[in-house]
Image (spheres, helix red, strand yellow):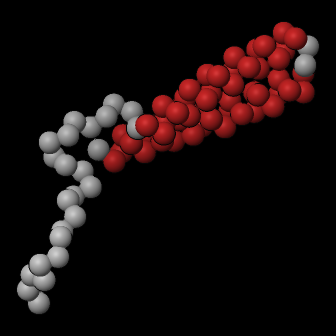
Amino acid sequence: MGDTGRYRCPPAHSPRQEPTVMPRLALYALSVCLLSVAAAVVSFVQGSWPVGIVWVLLAGVSSNMAWYYARRGRTAR
């Protein structure tokens, strides 16, 4: 019922740490989005339409992920 002498884990969020502006996963997803848009432009310029369409779809998914993780990080604060 009392203290067992076990080590207690520190809290997940230390009050001394500054909250990040945007969560790390949102930044990763945003960078994937920007790179896939650049790859789509290159594919369309080279005339490879099916590959360009795949890059556009990947850009759409990653932009949704970036929005989701940024929003989730904002509401967690």
Where residue 22 sits in the image (x, y, percent)?
Answer: 39, 33
Judge left or right: residue 17 versus residue 76: left
Work out which quarter of the rendered image holds the N terminus and state it.
bottom left
Is 1 or 49 nearer to us in this picture? 1
| Among the 4 quarters of the image, the one containing residue 12 | bottom left
Labels in figure, total? 0
The residue sitting at the left extreme is 2
**As drawn, 56 above or below 14:** above
Task: Identify the residue at image location x=36%, y=45%.
Answer: 75
Residue 67 seen anywhere in this rendered image of the structure: no
Task: Identify the residue at image location x=57%, y=40%.
Answer: 65
Task: Identify the residue at image location x=56%, y=34%.
Answer: 29
Residue 23 seen anywhere in this rendered image of the structure: yes
Work out which quarter of the rendered image holds the C terminus and state it.
top left
Judge left or right: residue 62 versus residue 54: left
**As drawn, 37 above or below 8:** above
Where residue 2 sits in the image (x, y, percent)?
Answer: 8, 86
Judge left or right: residue 43 versus residue 13: right
The residue sitting at the top extreme is 45
**As drawn, 8 above or below 47:** below
The residue sitting at the bottom extreme is 1
Judge left or right: residue 59 versus residue 50: left
Where residue 64 sits in the image (x, y, percent)?
Answer: 60, 37
Where residue 54 sits in the image (x, y, percent)?
Answer: 81, 31
Is 77 or 3 nearer to us in this picture? 3
Is 68 or 17 nearer to us in this picture? 17
Task: Identify the residue at image location x=34%, y=48%.
Answer: 76
| Among the 4 quarters of the image, the one containing residue 36 | top right
